[in-house]
């Protein structure tokens, strides 16, 4: 990489923090971040105002990337809303089973950052609102009787799937259970009234 194309300190800090906060958690030290980025402490404060601002910006970048992946997964499944939702769950199950999977960075950040006013929390809340909207739109298109509620359920399922994957429960992989739960959530609200199972 030439000097002309080498990322500047802001981008290097973002890249380093995006990697280290995922593999080591948001408690990773400032010195480790600066060393990995090859950046001076001054750059951290000039560009982000400190570590808290850097973490929030890293999460903002990650949410944009991950939401694009959710949309791509749905689009790969075609036009059927049921297939689009189940493809998301299937793909997450495969991701959670990968040896380099370290869990959901958003859930981990929310649990680790105990200050309710930390700027990262608004980023994770916005991410979940957007993801909820994606699920609710598909459920509405499917004709689900309670799309917003079912989207809540799918978000809980996603959190549980990713948390289980991070725990390395190899004797009880979550793929089959998560798929069946997703099918129940999606299908129960689209059965004719009077069916044996109803949503919520």
Image: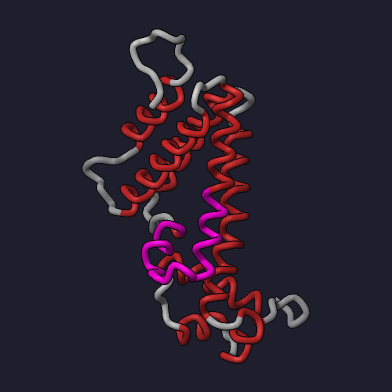
Identify the magenta region: 106-128
Question: Residue 44: x, y in percent?
Answer: 59, 84
Hey, which quadrant is residue 8 in on the image? bottom right
Identify the residue at horizontal 56%, vertical 75% (top origin): 54
Q: Residue at x 54, y 63 (%)?
A: 59
In this view, 149 is above or below 40:
above
Q: Quadrant of residue 5?
A: bottom right
Q: How is the image coloured?
A: secondary structure
Query: Left of 189 or right of it: where is 6?
Result: right
**Viewer-closest of 139 and 14:** 139
Across and down, in percent, residue 110 comes to 42, 62
Q: Nearer the viewer, residue 97 or 123?
A: 123
| Residue at position x 41%, y 77% in the image | 28
Q: Is residue 86 magenta?
A: no
Residue 143's place in the image compared with 91, above or below, is above
Whether residue 126 appears in magenta in the rendering, the answer is yes
Of helix, strand and loop, which mostly describes the magenta segment? Answer: helix
Which residue of the protein is positioned furthest toward the right in this rendering? 4
């Amino acid at each position: 990489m030439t000097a002309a194309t080498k990322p500047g300190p802001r981008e290097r800090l973002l890249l380093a923090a995006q990697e280290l906060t995922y593999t080591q958690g948001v408690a990773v030290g400032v010195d480790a971040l600066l060393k990995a980025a090859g950046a001076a402490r001054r750059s951290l404060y000039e560009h982000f105002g400190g570590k808290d601002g850097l973490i929030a910006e890293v999460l903002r970048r990650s949410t944009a990337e991950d939401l694009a992946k959710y949309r791509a997964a749905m689009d790969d499944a075609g036009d059927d809303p049921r297939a689009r939702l189940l493809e998301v769950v299937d793909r997450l199950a495969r991701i959670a089973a990968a040896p380099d999977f370290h869990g959901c960075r958003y859930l981990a950040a929310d649990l680790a950052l105990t200050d309710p006013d930390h700027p990262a929390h608004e980023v994770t809340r916005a991410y979940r609102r957007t993801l909820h909207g994606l699920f609710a739109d598909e459920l509405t298109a499917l004709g689900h009787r309670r799309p917003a509620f079912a989207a809540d359920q799918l978000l809980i399922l996603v959190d549980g799937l990713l948390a289980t994957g991070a725990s390395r429960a190899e004797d009880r992989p979550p793929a089959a259970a998560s798929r069946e739960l997703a099918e129940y959530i999606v299908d129960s609200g689209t059965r004719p009234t009077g069916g044996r199972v109803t949503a919520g």
